[in-house]
Amino acid sequence: MSNSEHLATVMVNAFIDAVDRGVDLVPVVADSTSTAKIAPFIKRFPGRLVNVGIAEQTLVGAAAGLALGGKVAVTCNAAPFLISRANEQIKVDVCYNNTNVKLFGLNAGASYGPLASTHHSIDDIAILRGFGNIEIYAPSSPGECRQIIDYALAHVGPVYIRLRR
């Protein structure tokens, strides 16, 4: 693992390794397969990914339902849309109900650069801290990212992992 490896690539490799170890993991995306760099997972495990389209509220609701059914549900979506558009579903479906959902906020902060403020997430951590019952992580390196993801997938309960671009 190099220090320049994209954190979304680290995420996908961790998902593949987890499924290989027997973790009943289901990624849920909102038309974000490219952003999530999840093609290697889809190729390895066809039919295991759920793509709800551009519908962040459905993304989180579906993940909560999968988790309540015994799956390890992982959402992979651009951080500003995941947190802002699905705010109530994260609070109620995930945090209040302590569901085993792992929320991956991709390209967090201002890392979308020229796409401007609609694509920046500078308040995601502050918003989620107000909900309680969720662990929040912002790894700074590929190695740290992998350790946090491995921990999160083994932990039972809500986790938000904020990944920079």
Image (tube, grey):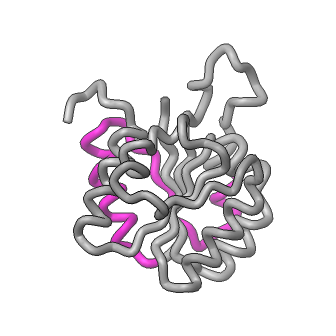
Identify the magenta region: 127-156
Q: Where is 51 relative to 63, above or below?
A: above
Residue 62 picture quarter? bottom right
Where does the image place residue 83, in percent across and percent down from the top left? 70, 51
Q: Residue at x 56, y 57 (%)?
A: 75
11 left or right of 71 in image: left
Whether residue 85 can be seen here: yes
Residue shown at the point (68%, 60%) measured from the top left: 59
From this view, report whether residue 77 is shown above or below residue 75: above
Q: Position of residue 131 (x, y in %)?
A: 69, 66
Specify whether 12 is left or right of 83. Answer: left
Q: Residue at x 64, y 72 (%)?
A: 94
Which of the pair 114/70 is nearer the observer? Answer: 70
* 135 is within the stretch colored magenta: yes
Q: Residue furthest left?
A: 1
Q: Residue 42 location, x and y as percent?
A: 43, 51
Quarter of the figure with residue 66: bottom right
Counting from the top left corner in percent of width and height, residue 9 is at 36, 39
Q: Quadrant of the N terminus?
A: top left
